[in-house]
Structures are given as C-alpha cells and as structure tokens.
Image (cartoon, rainbow, N blue to C red):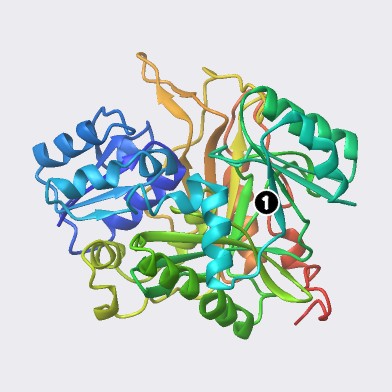
C-alpha cells in the first residue's frame, strides 16, 4: 500500500512514522511536509487546501490511500476531490467536516442526538452582546464561530475581558459563540468512525494554556499525555456509547455520514461527560502521544475506515505504559512568533523507543541548517513504563535541544502523575 499524508505539522510527522512501521505500507509520501518529515518520507510541494492539486498529486504518485491531516483542507472539501478520482481517502467530506467548521452545525447535531453539551448562544450583532453576556457567567466562554486553530477562545471570570474579545470578533465580522462553562477535567477522545461504526483510540489530555499551572493565553496545545490514569473505564465507555455513537448515527440519518477521525473534546464533570467541541481530524499534540502507544498497523486501520470496512478489522492493540508530548514553541508564541532561528540537537531517530522528536514548524535553510518556521516548532514525545518515566524521557530529550527564545511548559502530565486530577464528586485516585 502506497500512502500520501497531507499536512506539514508534528501530527503529520507522527502519522508518517506510524505508517512506516506498518509492514503492509510500501511507500509513504507527504505534502507539503516539513524538514523533519523529509527524513522519513518523500515530500512533495502542494497547496494542501486545493482539492484539485491534492487529487492530481495522489494520481501522479499512484497511491492507494490519502490521509488528510489538518482541518482546513477537510472543511474545504479536499477529501471529496480525492474520492472523486477514485482514491480511498481518510478524512470526512466537506459536509461532514462542518462538525468542526461550524459550531452551530455541531450544536444542532448534538441536540438532535441528545448529547450533553454546553448551553450556547450565537451573537452576530454588537448591540446584542451585552444582554447575551448577562445571561452567562460567572465564568464566560467566548468563541469564534468558525475555525480558529484553538486560538479563538477566551475563558475568563472577568466580564470586561469576555466583552472585549466578543466585540473584537464582531468587529472582524465573525459571529460570536457564548457558552456556559463546563466543570471537570478535559478529555480528548479520538475515534475512527465509518458511518455508524465507532472504534475509540486511547484517551488523551491536552494542555491548552501557554504557561505552567495552566496560566496565560490559550494556544493550539503545549503538550499532551496518554493514557489517563484518573479516567475510569466505565466513563470512557459512556463517552463512546452516549456521545460519539449517537453523533455518528445522527450524521448518517442526515445523509452526511462521517468517515475518518472524529475527535470529541469533553469535560468530565459531576453530572458526567459533556462535549466542549468536536473536531473532524486527529488533534495536535495528542496524536503524537496516542500513535506512540499504538501497537497495531496504522495503515490497515486508516484504509479500513476510508473503504467502509472498519467493522471487519480487529480493534487496535496498545503498548503498556504511557507517552507524554511536550511542545517546544518559538519566542512570542501564541502571539506573532519569531521564525528563522537555528535549532540544534533535534535529530529525529525514527525509532522512537524512549523518545522521539517530531517537527511541527521547521524548515531547512539553503546551508542545511534547521530553522524555526512556525509557532509550535517541535513536539518531543517520551515513552515509558508509566507517566513519570515517560515525562522524564521527554524532558531529558528536550534538554539537549537548543532554540533561541524557545519556551515550553515544565508540567505536562505532572498533575496526573502526582494523582492530583479527579472527576468532581470522586476521589483523586478514582
């Protein structure tokens, strides 16, 4: 099987490495890829958001499967264009990708499916903002009703901060989504979905805020870990049975069946799991940790999903232990990051036994130097017998990497390792 991965981040680097380990995969291509991916796959230039270009490249390379990584190409219909030329594609249609591309569509699907989610209102006129804000609080959640790469969200107990963010979005012509605040720790659950067939992967937890102790502004994610020692097996089953399966079934009922990776972001509070958001693709940085723990051939799972035969494949097997991803970000991220700084010590081994360096925002200069080319520059994944060992392996590897002005969180997975995370109403150790 020949596979083409679309995208240029650490998520795609993780997909490429996992696909290369599948004995049934004979060739892996990536477009546009990045400097790290180029060490493990043939990279080709492509406009990832152009269905015409991606479909033409897939035909030229004569691939058997296309895997679309990022959300923007999916929302713009790239998977439809590739399927239209007869090539199996892992990733939903543009219509199904609206589960991420339109918060209003997602809420409508969840309401019809009877899934618990935050109470919400959409404000599209500045004159309505104050009255709407009065209906929410004491913690306000203010979102951009569209794709914002995780950065269009403000969660605050300060009404003036909430108002300022809402007013700014409206001024830019973006509708504002106000939501009630959900209590409890967050869970990212990835599920392979093929119509009504739902196969969950390991649950993970992302660290969204830029600073230690969950301080500072939201980012696209500063690190993640899997599995979650504080999440009971029955709660995980409830998420699959009461959240993901009903949503998958509702989308089939609407004539927009989902095919690909459905990502449920949830808060697990005292009243049980409630959905914060759905995404239509693998999440970044959780993917890097989850795929590190996968013991089954990834190509087989993705191909089965893309060809409607997921119910015929054995469920995924997982390694023992844990994996922790720590993101090294460029100076000034998540504001306008500095780029072009030389990175040293970031060689990717491709073996990923104790640790692996995955490239997110990197480029290779003409003189061969590796330089930063994005906000999140590298994702370092540590693996170990437990979270403590996985954390140690990740941070030990990170200590050997130099990036001027680079910053990272020192506490990824620490609260879980120390048993400080619990679902409200339960004890910390379940």
Front-lying residue, 160 or 129: 129
Locate the N terminus and report the quarter of the image it occupies. bottom left
Residue 209: x and y, percent?
72, 44
Q: Can residue 165 be seen here?
A: no
Examine the rendered structure and indicate whether residue 231 appears above or below residue 107: below
Residue 398: name its quadrant: top right
Q: Which residue is the site of mark 1?
A: 207
Q: Can residue 273 be seen here?
A: yes
Find numbered disc 1 in the image and state the secondary structure of the residue it sits on: loop
Front-lying residue, 384 or 216: 216
Q: Residue at x 60, y 19 (%)?
A: 338
Front-lying residue, 285 or 26: 285
Is residue 156 found left or right of 205 in the rendered image? right
Residue 120: x and y, percent?
70, 53
Residue 52: x and y, percent?
20, 33
Q: Residue at x 72, y 26 (%)?
A: 168
Q: Residue at x 51, y 62 (%)?
A: 109
Examine the rendered structure and indicate whether residue 366 appears above or below residue 169: above
Residue 9: x and y, percent?
44, 39
Residue 389: name its quadrant: bottom right
Residue 21: name its quadrant: bottom left
**Outermost residue toward the top?**
366
Locate the C terminus and report the quarter of the image it occupies. bottom right
């Amino acid at each position: 099987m020949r596979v083409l991965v679309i995208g240029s981040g650490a998520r795609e680097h993780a997909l490429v490495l996992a696909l290369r380990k599948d004995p049934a995969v004979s060739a892996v291509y990536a477009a546009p890829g990045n400097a790290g991916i180029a060490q493990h796959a043939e990279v080709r230039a492509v406009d990832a958001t152009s269905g015409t270009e991606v479909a033409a490249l897939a035909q030229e390379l004569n691939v058997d499967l296309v895997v679309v990584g990022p959300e923007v190409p999916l929302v713009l219909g790239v998977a439809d264009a590739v399927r239209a030329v007869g090539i199996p594609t892992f990733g939903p249609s543009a219509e199904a990708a609206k589960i991420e591309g339109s918060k209003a569509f997602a809420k409508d699907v969840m309401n019809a499916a009877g899934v618990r989610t935050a109470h919400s209102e959409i404000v599209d006129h500045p004159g309505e903002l104050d009255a709407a804000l009065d209906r929410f609080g004491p913690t306000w959640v203010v979102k951009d009703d569209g794709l914002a790469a995780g950065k269009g969200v403000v969660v605050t107990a300060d009404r003036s901060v909430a108002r300022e963010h809402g007013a700014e979005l409206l001024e830019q012509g973006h509708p504002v989504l106000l939501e009630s605040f959900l209590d409890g720790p967050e869970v990212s659950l990835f599920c392979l979905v093929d119509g009504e067939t739902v196969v969950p992967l390991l649950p993970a937890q992302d660290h969204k805020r830029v600073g230690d102790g969950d301080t500072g502004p939201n980012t696209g994610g500063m690190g993640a870990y899997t599995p979650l020692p504080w999440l009971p097996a029955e709660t995980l089953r409830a998420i699959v049975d009461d959240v993901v399966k009903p949503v998958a079934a509702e989308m089939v009922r609407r004539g927009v069946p989902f095919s690909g990776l459905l990502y449920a972001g949830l808060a697990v509070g005292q009243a049980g799991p409630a959905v914060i958001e759905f995404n239509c693709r693998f999440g970044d940085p959780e993917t890097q940790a989850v795929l590190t723990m996968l013991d089954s051939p990834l190509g087989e799972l993705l191909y089965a999903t893309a060809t409607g035969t997921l119910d015929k494949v054995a469920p995924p097997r997982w390694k023992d232990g844990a994996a922790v991803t720590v993101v090294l970000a460029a100076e000034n991220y998540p504001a306008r990051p500095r780029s072009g700084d030389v990175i040293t010590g970031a060689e990717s081994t491709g073996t990923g036994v104790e640790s692996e360096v995955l490239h997110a925002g990197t480029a290779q200069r003409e003189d061969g130097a590796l330089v930063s080319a994005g906000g999140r520059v590298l994702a370092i994944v540590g693996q170990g017998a437990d979270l403590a060992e996985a954390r140690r392996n990740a941070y030990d590897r990170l200590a050997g990497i130099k990036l001027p002005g680079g910053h990272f969180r020192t506490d990824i997975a620490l609260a879980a390792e120390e048993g400080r995370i619990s679902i409200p109403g339960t004890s910390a150790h379940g």
